[in-house]
């Protein structure tokens, strides 16, 4: 009879621990996926920004040494991702391919200019930064004009800010929900042991002595749940990298390491705080209130 009851209690305890670990792992997994979404949203935004081209058109009397010096200085500039010299002949050939006919034969001359096409690093693709860069380049005597798509840059910058704001809002909501779910699971687990807590208190055990085993147990469960969430997250990363290699999900190892560490630490901290406040609540209850 006693052995049967002990087995029942053991199964009940294991079931309680399993539900806590499962809830923690699933919630942390969703938070990790959200973190990956944040990373790839930024990468996608940076990708579009770095497709913006700043064209520096050169005067016909510009010397080759001046052109070479300008290109070298642009390549070494902190805002430059890539700088390519395009001669007027190459530009004419490209334009003819785009329109499907040789416009030089029709005009009788080539109206295009030699130019340097500059692709900027993403952090410099803002209306203010590009305007400043264009002003500096236009001040050079052998530069005819600096051209770029101002409306597109303004629209892109505005949309990136809007998307980033809403992603932060969603992250905050999900984190709040994660705390609530994990806290509820741990409170339910401790609720089933409220009589044990009160019995220990009645025989003279201090609050810290009663709290510590619960905190340590649930912190270990939080660690286990976090590890399980990271395994699931690693599996998702591997699947996405195999099927969508162009996303380069595994390239940013520093961010991924920070994300994995953040998920693990978050699981431990939430488990610790939830256990502390849940046990404190039952420690402060009167005996009669334990039945409600």
Image (cartoon, grey):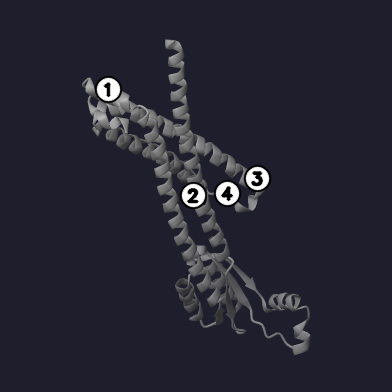
Measured in 3D between alpha carbons, the distance from the residue under mark 1 to the one under mark 3, in whole angstroms, is: 56 Å
Q: Is residue 95 above or below residue 50?
A: below
Nearer to us: label 2 or label 1: 1
The image shows residue 134 at horizontal and vertical percentages of 50, 76
- Where is residue 261, by image quadrant? top left
- Give the mark, 4 or 1, whose residue is nearer the N terminus: 1
Instruction: Give the numbered dot on residue 184.
Output: none
Q: Residue at horizontal 52%, vertical 83%?
A: 141
- Give the mark, 4 or 3, whose residue is nearer the N terminus: 3
The image shows residue 191 at horizontal and vertical percentages of 36, 31
- Give the mark, 4 or 2, whose residue is nearer the N terminus: 2
- Residue hosting label 2: 35
Instruction: Give the numbered dot on residue 199.
Output: 1
From the viewer's side, name the closer residue of 66 and 84. Answer: 84
- Residue hosting label 4: 249
Does the image show residue 108?
no
């Amino acid at each position: 009879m006693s052995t049967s009851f002990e087995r029942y209690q053991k199964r009940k305890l294991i079931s309680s621990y399993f539900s806590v670990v499962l809830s923690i792992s699933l919630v942390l997994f969703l938070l990790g996926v959200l973190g990956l979404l944040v990373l790839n949203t930024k990468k996608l935004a940076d990708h579009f920004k770095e497709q913006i081209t700043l064209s520096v058109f050169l005067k016909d009397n510009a010397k080759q040494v001046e052109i070479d010096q300008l290109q070298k200085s642009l390549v070494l500039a902190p805002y430059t991702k890539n700088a390519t010299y395009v001669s007027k002949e190459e530009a004419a050939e490209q334009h003819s391919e785009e329109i499907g006919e040789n416009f030089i034969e029709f005009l009788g001359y080539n109206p295009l200019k030699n130019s340097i096409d500059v692709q900027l690093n993403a952090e410099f693709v803002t209306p203010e930064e590009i305007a400043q860069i264009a002003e500096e380049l236009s001040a050079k005597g052998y530069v005819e004009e600096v051209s770029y798509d101002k409306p597109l840059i303004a629209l892109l910058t505005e949309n990136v800010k809007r998307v980033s704001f809403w992603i932060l809002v969603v992250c905050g909501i999900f984190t709040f929900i994660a705390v609530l779910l994990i806290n509820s699971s741990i409170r339910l687990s401790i609720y089933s042991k409220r009589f044990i807590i009160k019995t220990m208190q009645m025989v003279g055990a201090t609050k810290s002595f009663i709290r510590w085993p619960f905190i340590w147990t649930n912190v270990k469960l939080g660690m286990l749940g976090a590890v399980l969430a990271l395994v699931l997250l690693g599996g998702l990363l591997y699947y996405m990298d195999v099927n969508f290699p162009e996303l380069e999900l595994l390239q940013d190892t520093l961010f991924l390491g920070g994300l994995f560490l953040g998920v693990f630490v978050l699981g431990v901290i939430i488990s610790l705080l939830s256990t502390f406040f849940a046990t404190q609540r039952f420690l402060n209850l009167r005996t009669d209130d334990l039945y409600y």
